[in-house]
Image (spheres, grey):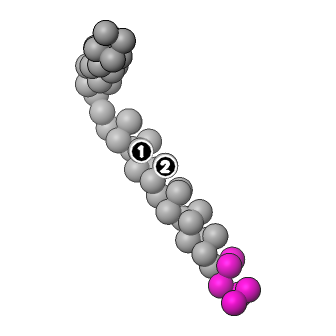
Amino acid sequence: MPQMAPLFWMNLFFIFNFCLSLYTIMIWAMPPKMIMKVKKQTKYTNKINLW
C-alpha cells in the first residue's frame, strides 16, 4: 500500500507540530516565577542524583 505512506507521514508531522505548539503555549502561559522554581527544582534533583 504505497499510497498510505504519505498520509502516515502527514499525520506524524501534524502530531509533532501539535505537541510542539502545546509545549510553547505552556511555556508562554507559565509565569516567570514558576519557570525559576522549575529550574531550581531541576538543579536540586541534579544535586541529589550526583550524591
Q: Please report the residue visible at 41 percent of the width from the left and 44 percent of the height from the top.
A: 23
Q: Quadrant of residue 48?
A: top left
Give the residue drawn at x 45%, y 53%: 19
At horizontal 49% and vertical 49% (from top left) the residue drawn is 20
Using the rendered view, name the quadrant where residue 25 is placed. top left
Given the current orientation, which residue lies at the most extreme front position? 51
Q: Quadrant of the C terminus?
A: top left
Residue extending furthest toward the right:
2
Give residue 35's position: percent from left, percent from top: 32, 24
Local packing at callout 1 (Cα closer than 10 Å; few below 14, some 14-19, many 20+) is: few
Query: Which amino acid, by three-letter code, is at mark 1?
Result: Tyr
Q: Is residue 30 left or right of residue 15?
A: left
Type of amino acid at the residue the image marks with label 2: Leu
Q: CA distance from mark 2 to mark 1?
A: 5 Å
Q: In the displayed structure, would residue 5 be above or below residue 46?
A: below
- In the rendering, at what x and y percent does residue 9 appear? 64, 70
Q: Quadrant of the N terminus?
A: bottom right
Which label was assigned to residue 49?
none
In magenta, the rendered stretch is: 1-6
| Mark 1 lies on residue | 23
Instruction: Please tell me whether mark 2 sits on a helix, a strand or a loop.
Output: helix
Residue 3 belongs to magenta span: yes
Frontmost residue, 17 versus 50:
50
Verify CB contact (< 8 Å) between mark 2 and mark 1: yes
Secondary structure at badge 1 equals: helix
- Quadrant in the picture for residue 50: top left
**Picture residue at 38% right of the left edge, 36% below the top:** 28
Q: Residues within 10 Å of mark 2 (few under 14, many from 20)?
A: few
